[in-house]
Amino acid sequence: MSTGPLDRARNAMEGRTSETGFDHELYRLFPTHRPRPEGEVEELEKIWDNPTGWGLLTVVNNNYIGFFYVAAAFLFFLLAGILALGMRVQLAAPLQDFLPPDTYNRFFTMHGTVMMFLFAVPMVEAIGIMLLPQMLAARDLPFPRLSAYAFWAYFVGGLCFFASIFVGLAPDGGWFMYPPLTSLTYSPGINTDFWLLGIGFIEISAIAGAIEIIVGVLRTRAPGMTLDRMPMFAWAMLVFAVMIVIAFPSVILGTLLLELERAFNWPFFDPARGGDPLLWQHLFWFFGHPEVYIIFLPAAGLMSMMVATVARTELVGYRLNVLALVATGFISFGVWAHHMFATGMPRVSTGYFSAASMAVSLPAGIQVFCWIATLAAGKIRWSTPALFVVGSIGIFVMGGLTGVMVGMVPFDWQVHDTYFIVAHLHYVLLGGMVFPMFAAFYYWNGMTSKNALSERMGKWVFWLMFTGLHVTFLPMHLTGFMGMPRRVYTYLPDRGLDLLNLVSTIGAFVIAAGVLLFLFDLARRFRFTTSEDAGNVYGGGTLEWLPTGMYSTRSIPLVRSREPLWDDPDICDDVAEGRYFLPNTVTGLRETIITSPINAEPQYLQLMPGPSPWPIGAAVFTAAFFLALTVQAYAFSAFAGVVALVCVLRWLWETDRPIQQETADIGAGIVVPIAITGPSSHGWWALNTLMVVMGMIVFMAIFSYLYLYGINPEVWIAPPSLPQTAGIAALLVLALGSARLSRRILASKPKGAFPGQAPWLMAAIGAALLGAAIWWDWTGWSGAGLDPTASGQGATVFALLAFQACTVAIAGIMALYLGYRSGRGLLVGPSNVTLDVVVRFIGYAALQGLACALVVRLFPGG
Amino acid sequence: MSQRISMVSTMSNAPSDVFDAWWDWPPPVLDPAGPYADSVVVLAWALIGMGVVVTAIVVAALYVAIKGPDHWKTKLGGEKAVWIGGIAFPSVVLTGLLVWGLTLTASLTEPVPQDTMRIRVTGYMWWFDVEYLDADGNVVMRDANELHLPVGEPVVVELASEDVIHSFWVPNLSGKEDMIPGRVNELVIQADRAGRYGGVCAEYCGGPHALMGFVTVAHDRADWEAWIEGRSRLRPEIVDQDVPGEVPAITPAVARDATNSLDGRRLFMDSGCAACHRIAGTEANGLAGPDLTRVGSRMTLGAGILPNNRGTMIGWIGDSQSIKPGNRMPSYDMLSAEELEAIAIWLEQQK
C-alpha cells in the first residue's frame, strides 16, 4: 500500500490510521461502565452557570450569543423587508410620489445592504455559532469571547447604521456603491461614509466569526468525528468561513480605498489622474460573487441535514455533496466579472467568465440531485420544515436556471441591470437561503424553545410565503424583458408596466403576511431555554439532539457514524450518564477537548473563559470608533479607539493563566495535556487565519497597483534607488531575526523560571526595526517625488505603505504589552502563548513589509 | 399636491405613438429590429425553453421522489441519479449552451468596416448628449436624447460619460453597454426596419435615474437623406469651431407668434438659459445641459419622458423640478405664463 501524503490523509480521514499517534484501541473503552461519582452534573452546572439581569450582557456562551445573534439578524431581515414593502408601494402604480426619488434611492440601497451585510451573512454565521458546538458536541466554540465581540460589534454598529435612514443620512449609491457616483464629487454628504465605515466594521465582525468557525470545526469536534463523519452543515460552515477569509479582505480594501479617496483625495477611481472606476468593480465583485455562495452554502448545509431527517434516511451522496461544497468555494472565486459583461470587457475575458459561471452551476446541480435522491431513498414525513425544504428546492432551481441564462454573455447584455436580474437574484436568495432558514427555524426551534412551533400555522406560513414569492417575482422576469431597468423609483404610464408591477406589489404583501403569521406564532409559542427544551421534534440523528444543558452535553460522545442517534439508540442515555469523554470538570474551570483536524483524536484540554464584560466593551467602543469617524467627531473617535484597545488588552490579560495541573484524565483513564502552545494549539490556527486575512488585503492592494499600472502606465514615475530598497529589505530581515531570537531565548530557560527582560526586549527591537523600515520606505517614495494625490501610482503605493504602517503600529503595541507583562513577571517559559503570538505577528509584519516594499519598487521599476 | 396632478396629467397625455416598438407586445427584448438583437432573441427563446423544461424535470423528479411508485423511487434514490441528473445532464446542456454563447458573442463583436458611420453618445446626469461624427472624427452635428440612423446600415456608437457611469440600451436593437468615465466603449447597432425605438439608461446613476431615456429613430433610405439634408441646410455647422455668431435669418412668419407679443429669444438669453444650453448660431453656448439647436424637432422633452409640444415645453421650463425631481435645471417658476409661453414658442422654432 502506497503511503503518499494523500493516502495518509485519506486513511486518517476514514479512521484507519492514527493522525496524532493516539491509539484507536482506546475507543473500545467507551461507553464506560463504572458508575460516575455523585455531584459531577451539579458542578458542571455551577461552572457553566450564566449571570442574569444586566450580567447577561457579559455572557459569552454560544447558547446565548448564538441566540442573540440569530434574533438580531432576523430583526434586520424584518427591517429590510419593511423597506422592500415601501418600495413596492411606490412602484404599485406609475408616477406615484409615496417615496420621493432620494428617499427611494436610500430605501433600495439600504434594502440591499441590510439584507446582504446585516441579515444574510450574519444570519448564517449566527446559526453556525448557535448550532455548531452542539452538532460537534463541544462544550463551546474555542473562542467564546471572540463570538461575543463579533456579535456585539455587529449588533450595536448595525443598529446605528440602520438608524441613518431615519435622519436622511442613509447611503444612496446602491448596495454595490459604484464610484464615481459614490465619490466626493457626486456624493458630497456623509451618507456614503456611513456605508463605507459601517460596512467596514461589520465585515471585521464577520471575519472574527469566521476565524471562530474555522478553528471550531477543525479542532473541537467530538472524538471519532472524522472529516468523513462530520455533519454536512459543519462542512458547509468550514467552506463558508474559509471563503469569508479570502473574499472579505477584497471589499475591506475596496472600502478603505474609496474612503481614502473621499477623505484625502487619493485618486484610485478617478480616471483623470490614472485611477479607474472599474477597479472598484473588480474589488467589489471579487468579494461580491463569492458572497452569494457564502450565503447559500451554509443554507445548503442545513438543507442536507433536514432532507435526511424529513426523508428519514441518510443523505445520498455524502462525499459528492462535500465535493460540491468545496468545488463551489473554489470556482466562485473565478466568476466575479460576470457582473461586468456590459462594461466593454475584452471578448476573451467574457468567454472565460461565462465558462466559469456555467461551471459553478454544476456543484449546485449535484446538491439538488443529492437532495432529490435522498427524498426518493427514504419516505417523506410531511411537516413544516419538510414543506420549506421541498419548496426551496423548486425555487432555488428556478433561480439557478435564470442564473445560467444570464451567464450567457449576449443574453446578459440584454437583461443585465433590468428587473429580470431582480427576479433572478430574489429567486436564488429566497430559495437558496431564506426558505432553508425558515425550515431551520422550525426544525431547530426545539433546541432553544420550551414549546414547539405550531405545525398548522407553519403550513399557512409556508403557503403564504411560497405563493407570495411567485406572485412577486415571476412577473419581474417579464418586466425586465419589457425594458424596465432596476433601481428606478418610478416608471412612465402607457408602457404596459402598470399591471405587472401592481401584481408584484400584491405578492410582496402576501409574503409579508406569511412572515407576520410566523411572528405571531413565535410570540405565542417561543420561549427561550437552554435546558428544558422541546427537543428532537422531527427526529434528527445528529449530536445536537443529545440531551444538553448550558455545558452542552454531560459527556462528549465517541462518534462512530454520521447519524449517531439513529445508529446507537443508547447514545443519549450513555452521554447523559457520563459514560463518554469528559463527564466532569477536571480543573474546576470551563473546558473542552481539542481534537485533531482530520481524525478528531483527542489532543489536549482547552480551558475556556467565563462571562466577561471586556468583549462587549471592546465591541461597543469599536462601533463608536467607526461611527464617530463617520460623523467626523475625530476626538471622540480617537477616545473610543483607545478604550476599545484597552478592553481588548484587558481581555487578553488572562491568557497564560498559571494552573497547577499539567495533564487531565478525560475519561476511561485517557490522559491529555492541558493548554499547549505551538502548531497543535487552537490559538496558532486562529493567528494563522488572521494572517491569511491580512495577507489577502495586501494581495488585493498589490492587484490594484498592477491593475492601475496596466490601465494608465504613462503617469508612472521611477521608484527610489535600488540600494535604498536593499537597505529596507535588510532592516526587515533583521526584524524577523530578532523576533525569532526572542522565542529562542525564552525556550532556552528552565521551565517555570523567569527569563528576565531579554525576550521582550528582542521582540521590541524587532518592532522598532519594522518601524524604521516603514519610515525609510515612506520617506524614500516621498523623496522620489511620488504624491498620493497626484496619480494612481501614488495612491496605491501610499495605500500599501499606510497599511504596512498600521500593521507595524499594531506590532509595536503588542511589543509594549509584552513588555508590561514581562515587567509584571508574567512572561514565563519555556512556552508562552502571548510571546508566541507577538513574535509571530512581528515576523508576519516583516514579511508583509518585504512584499509591499519589493513589489512596488521592483515592478515595473520605471 | 397640485404640482403632482399637473405632472401626471401632463404625462398621461403622452401619445403612446411616440414610440412604435417600445413597451408594446411582444416585449422589446424579444422583438428584434436588427441583426444585433435578432440572434440574441433566438438564444433567449432557447434559454427560456431550457429553463421551463429543466424546471419541469426537477419538479417531476421531486414528485416521483415523494409520491412515485417504489420501483421508480429506488432508481432515483441512489448516487447514480446524482451522477446522471446532477452531473452528466447539466454538463451536456451547459457545454452546448456555452459553445453557442461564445460563438454568438464572437459574431456580435466582429469588427465593422472602417468607414462605418459613427455617433458619439455621452452620458450626463440625467440625459444623453449625441454627436454625429464625420469620417475624420469631427463633430458635424449635435443633438440630445435622440438618435437618428439609416435603416440597414451598421452604426458605431461611441459611448462615453462626463460624470458617473451610465449605460446605453435600446433593447430592440442590441444589448446594453456601459458608459464609463475615462473610457470610450464602442457598440454597434443596426436597425433593419424603420421606426422609433425607446432607449434608457440602464445603470443606476443617482437621483432621477428612472427618468433618463432617449429615442432612436431609424429612417428609410430616402427619408434619411431628406432628414440629413434638412439638418445641414437649416443649420450648417462644424461644432468644434463653434463661435457665437450671426443669428440665422428666420422668416418673419415664424419669428413671432401672432398670439404672443413677447420676445422669446430675448427672454431665453436674459433668464440665464444660455449659461447651460447651446443653440448654434446664437450667443447661447452653454455646455452643461442638452444642446437645444434642434429642440423644436425633437420628439421628447426631459430626456425621453415627455412628448414635445408647446404645453409640455411650458410645463418643463416652469416646473421641471416636480416633473423630474433633482434634475440639474431649476424650475423657472418666477417667469409668468406669458413669458414661459414666449420662450416655448421661440424654442419650437429651433429645428
Image (cartoon, coloured by chain):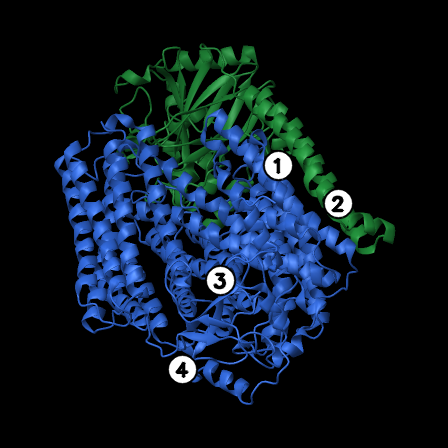
Q: Is residue B221 left or right of residue A169?
A: right
Residue A499 visible: no
Of the chain colours in the picture, the one used for chain A is blue
- The 10 Å Cα crowd at callout 1, few under 14, some 14 to 19, many 20 or more, is many
Image point (49%, 38%), residue name: A334
- Mark nearer the viewer, 1 or 2: 2
User: Mark 4 — on which chain does it sit?
Assistant: A
Q: Secondary structure at mark 2?
A: helix
Do residues under tags 2 and 3 come within 8 Å of each other at their CB atoms? no
User: Mark 3 — on which chain does it sit?
Assistant: A
Quadrant including the C terminus of chain B? top left
Give the tally of numbered discs.
4
Q: Are marks 1 and 3 on the same chain?
A: yes
User: Mark 1 — on which chain does it sit?
Assistant: A
Using the numbered discs, state the Cα–Cα distance from disc 2 to disc 4 in whole angstroms.
55 Å
Residue on which disc 4 sits: A54
- Mark nearer the viewer, 1 or 3: 3
Residue on which disc 2 sits: B81
- The 10 Å Cα crowd at callout 4, few under 14, some 14 to 19, many 20 or more, is few
Q: Nearer the viewer, residue B164 or A114?
A: A114
Using the numbered discs, state the Cα–Cα distance from disc 1 to disc 4 in whole angstroms.
53 Å
Of the chain colours in the picture, the one used for chain B is green
- The 10 Å Cα crowd at callout 2, few under 14, some 14 to 19, many 20 or more, is many
Q: Secondary structure at mark 1?
A: helix
Most distant residue in the bottom direction = A38
Do residues under tags 1 and 4 come within 8 Å of each other at their CB atoms? no
Question: In the rendered image, which quarter is residue A640 located in?
Answer: bottom left
Label number found at residue A219 = 3
Using the numbered discs, state the Cα–Cα distance from disc 4 to disc 3 in whole angstroms.
33 Å
- Mark nearer the viewer, 4 or 3: 3
Label 4 sits on what residue type? Trp
